[in-house]
């Protein structure tokens, strides 16, 4: 998504985000990462000053601080995802995360999506399935399809990518074939190399 991102060419319009939209962005982040409390998020993304929304291409919104520092983005109606620099700046925020095995690292850093074996091989870690149940008493997967995740690599302390689950964690464990996570932003892509947008 941001592999060849160039803010001087790819960003078209900007506008300050209304407080109701900013609350919705925070609510989406809280929904995607239930371990993050509202107080934690308010400390790192205060109400004032408001965020600035930049339109990138026809279907992507980039949310930045007034200084131009990107903090989050959203593709179409997908989940709001934090930028890697934001994740690295606040390593104590407990975003929903997965860990891939070491064999997946060079592919991810080249912009590839994460295949299921990278999550199910030794070294890959996903939240456990079946810790909670739905309204019918069935076990819920640890991660739902479409969930926003911050991706770590085996043996590394900093996140290397952010993305969206293409299958639930239970389906990934069951099939262990195909694409498990669509990578939206990775270490070294155009967005990561962008310090500010003007």
Image (tube, rainbow, N blue to C red):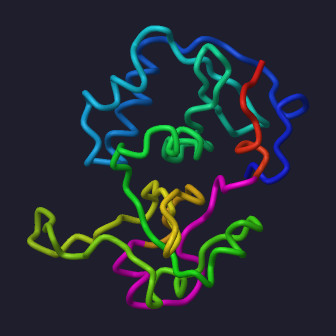
The residue lying furthest to the top in this view is 48
Residue shown at 44%/39% (left/top)? 90
Q: In the rendering, at what x and y percent does residue 9 appear?
A: 90, 32
Q: How many marks?
A: 0
Residue 5 left/right relative to 35: right
Quadrant containing the C terminus in the rendered view: top right
- 11 and 103: which is toward the camera: 103
The residues colored magenta run: 168-188
Q: Is residue 110 above or below residue 171?
A: above
Q: Is residue 138 above or below residue 164?
A: below
Residue 148 left/right relative to 96: right
Residue shown at 39%/30% (left/top)? 26
Residue shown at 82%/43% (left/top)? 5
Question: Does the magenta-highlighted stretch encompass residue 177?
Answer: yes
Residue shown at 40%/81% (left/top)? 171
- 103 and 62: which is toward the camera: 103
Q: In the rendering, at what x and y percent does residue 92 appear?
A: 35, 44
**Quadrant position of residue 109:** bottom right
The residue lying furthest to the right in this view is 9
Q: In the rendering, at what x and y percent does residue 107 appear?
A: 71, 75
Q: Is residue 57 above or below residue 160?
A: above
Question: Does the magenta-highlighted stretch encompass residue 30?
Answer: no
Q: In the rendering, at what x and y percent does residue 45 appear?
A: 42, 23
């Amino acid at each position: 998504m941001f592999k060849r991102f160039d803010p001087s060419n790819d960003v078209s319009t900007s506008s300050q985000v209304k407080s109701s939209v900013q609350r919705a962005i925070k609510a989406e982040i809280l929904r995607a990462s239930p371990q993050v409390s509202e107080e934690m998020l308010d400390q790192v993304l205060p109400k004032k000053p408001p965020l600035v929304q930049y339109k990138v291409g026809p279907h992507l919104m980039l949310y930045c601080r007034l200084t131009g520092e990107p903090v989050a983005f959203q593709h179409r109606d997908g989940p709001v995802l934090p930028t890697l620099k934001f994740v690295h700046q606040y390593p104590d925020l407990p975003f929903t995360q997965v860990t891939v095995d070491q064999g997946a690292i060079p592919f991810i850093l080249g912009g590839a999506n994460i295949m299921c074996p990278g999550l199910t091989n030794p070294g890959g870690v996903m939240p456990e399935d079946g810790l909670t149940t739905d309204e019918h008493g069935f076990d819920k997967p640890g991660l739902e399809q479409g969930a926003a995740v911050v991706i770590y690599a085996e043996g590394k302390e900093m996140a290397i990518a952010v993305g969206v689950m293409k299958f639930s964690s239970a389906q990934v464990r069951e099939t262990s074939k195909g694409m498990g996570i669509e990578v939206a932003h990775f270490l070294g892509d155009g967005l990561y190399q962008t310090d500010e947008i003007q």
